[in-house]
Image (cartoon, rainbow, N blue to C red):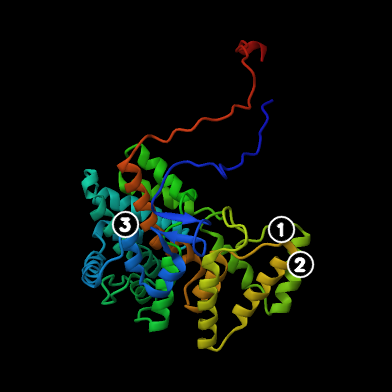
Amino acid sequence: MAKVLSGAGLRGQVAGKTALSTVGVSGSGLTYRGYDVKELAEKCEFEEVAFLILKGHLPNAQELSDYKALLKSLRELPQALKDVLERIPANAHPMDVMRTGCSMLGNLEMEEDFSQQDKITDRMLACFPSIICYWYRFSHDGERIDVNTDDDSIGAHFLHMLHGKKPSDLLERVMHVSLILYAEHEFNASTFTARVCASTLSDMHSCITGAIGSLRGPLHGGANEAAMDMIEKFDSPDHAEQEMLGMLERKEKIMGFGHAIYSDSDPRNDIIKGWSKQLAETLGDTNLYDVSVRCEAVMKREKGLFCNADFFHASAYTYMNIPTKLFTPIFVMSRLTGWAAHVMEQRADNRIIRPSADYNGEDLRPVVDISAR
């Protein structure tokens, strides 16, 4: 009988080189092309950071204006894609919608050669919010929305389509921050999936579709949804502490804590936590935030674990009236930048990614005649 051994998940193994980001190495703990994410989140809009990751430098004022205008012009969806989205049921997983939408787009707007990779990426960056909101509003509200809003930013565009009205300046700013924090994170599971796909010289849509499939899993992008599913069950901070202690005693999995790379804290958490608090105070309802803070304290005290970026994103998104099922698609709207940049980087100096495995099965044996088995 073959033995099944638990693998180490390649943790600590160097699998390639990148100039896009560092995790747990310098600054507050996360940098994009040499810039600390904390400073980027404080001073930049998401479109600036997307430009940085994809083009290699922060844009000047004219470059940013031109880039935002370009993205704004690329939001419309082909009718054939709308037809597909209208056939996806309301109970479908939104990440499956994103995966299907990206794949269908690749059929309609194929990447004929790699010289089109910038154009293809900009198109996806512009229309991914349109894909998820068009499906959501049609499947849940029966409305075929206009995906060409007059909003200048991707975050405001998403909220406008979702809620049918322009968001406040505060909500737009929080979206900028959130998208910046999720934009890139070195060789995580979904990014590595994209690079493996790229190493075969596959097209950009296939690489991104594969990455979406990896991000769908609850151990990766789905953690913010799982965190919210837990948090919303708690009536108060005291109730949260009581329930979490019971969960720990029963050895139940608690999502949103700890990280594969960070050892002491996730630099993204402190940033989004501050915005969650500001949203709570602005709305005059701090209970969800207070519950989240108590959960954080319990896990730190009992297990020595810290919140990752997903945990306080859950409360921030909820204060913004974003349905829990759409949390991870927002991650896709942002991380597309990192995925595509890694695909481009892989293509620029490519060798097919083909690791080896330690065999732990049966020794060599003969095939016994079927009558003797």
Residue 245 marker: 2
Q: Mark 2 touching mark 3, by CB under 8 A?
A: no
- Write down the quadrant of residue 131 in the picture: bottom left
Q: How crowded is mark 2: few (under 14 residues within 10 Å), some or many (20 or more)?
A: some
Q: In this view, does 151 lie to the left or right of 255?
A: left
Residue 339 placed where, x, y %?
A: 39, 52
Query: At which x and y percent is residue 182?
Result: 45, 63
Residue 259: quarter of image: bottom right
Residue 104, percent across and down?
31, 51
The residue carrying mark 1 is 252
Q: Is residue 88 visible?
A: no
235 sits left or right of 203 in the view? right
Disc 1 and disc 3 in contact, CB within 8 angstroms: no
Which circle's residue, 1 or 3, is located before the other in the chain?
3
Q: Which residue is drawn at 45% across and 46% down?
A: 192
Mark 1: amino acid: Glu
